[in-house]
Image (cartoon, rainbow, N blue to C red):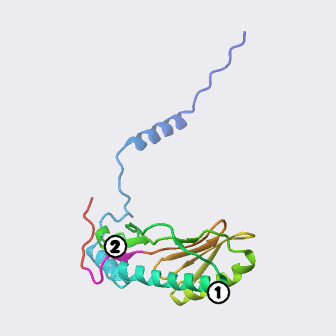
Amino acid sequence: MTRQPQRRMPLFAATLAAAIALTACGPARPSSTTTMNTTSADSAAQLRELNSRPDIDQITQRYDDMRAVIRERLSAEIGLAPWIKRDEISRSGCRAYPDVDQALKEARGLSRWAVETNLPDAKWPQALQIVTDIAGSHGFNKLITVIDQPGDHEISLNDEYGGELIFGTKLNTILSVRTGCHPRTAGQQGTSPPAT
């Protein structure tokens, strides 16, 4: 019976593996390039920029008014009706302006509106023109075509505040809007979030 020779890890490789294992278990050290504390000037600048936007109630009203006009035109010109409100407003914090206290800022998902039918392909270009014209006049000028296939169409439009309007049709035809980050109240005062 022949004996298989034993394989040994070279000394360098064993030392390297041990060093990696030890550093992986050690305490984390901040990088010299990482800023650990945000200055109050940064927080104040972010709060000023946030407060230059319409407050969350103002932008919600503006978007609701825009969607009402879109629904009316789609109903009158294309016969797309009746529109049904599918859900209520959802509220959340927002990641933008990270040095501003979460209590001072908010983003919202507005109620979705839907028609329980597919919009025929022949009518999609006209419907798309109506939506992009009205939304464009309200600042939603960045158009992304999400899908454009027979019987299945969806677009996304964005405005300067990070708001997003979705219009699409497949089994149903939907119109929804999510806001960007806005102050909870106009001209609010605030501080940076507490240090953790």
Question: Residue at 65% of width from left, 69% of height from top?
Answer: 117
Q: Relative to 101, is 71 above or below?
A: below
- Residue most toward the front? 82
In terms of secondary structure, where does tag 2 sit?
strand
Quadrant of the rendered structure where residue 39 is?
A: bottom left
Look at label 2 and name its amino acid. Lys
Q: In this view, does 72 lie to the left or right of 148?
A: left
Indicate whether residue 182 is drawn in magenta: yes
- Asked where in the image residue 83 lies, by quadrant, the reply is bottom right
Q: Is the magenta stretch mostly helix, strand or loop?
A: loop
Residue 158 image point, x, y percent: 53, 79
Which quadrant would the N terminus be assigned to in this image? Answer: top right
Q: Along the horizontal axis of the image, is 147 left or right of 92?
A: right
Tag 1 secondary structure: helix
- Tell us which disc is closer to us: 2 or 1: 1
Q: Residue at x 66, y 20 (%)?
A: 5
Location of residue 168 with respect to 65 vertically, above or below: above
Q: What stretch is highlighted in magenta?
A: 181-188
Point out residue 30 in the picture as x, y percentages from the top left corner.
Answer: 35, 57
Q: In percent of the image, x 68 and y 18: which residue is there?
A: 4
Residue at mark 2 to residue at mark 1: CA–CA distance: 38 Å
Q: In which quarter of the image is the C terminus?
A: bottom left
Q: Earlier in the sequence, mark 2 or mark 1?
A: 1
Residue indicated by mark 2: 105
Q: Which residue lies under the disc numbered 1?
A: 77
- Give the side of residue 65 with respect to residue 74, left or right: left
Answer few, some or many: residues within 10 Å of disc 2's Cα (few below 14, many 20 plus, some between 14 and 19).
many
Residue 184: which disc?
none
Amino acid on which the number 1 mark rests in the picture: Glu
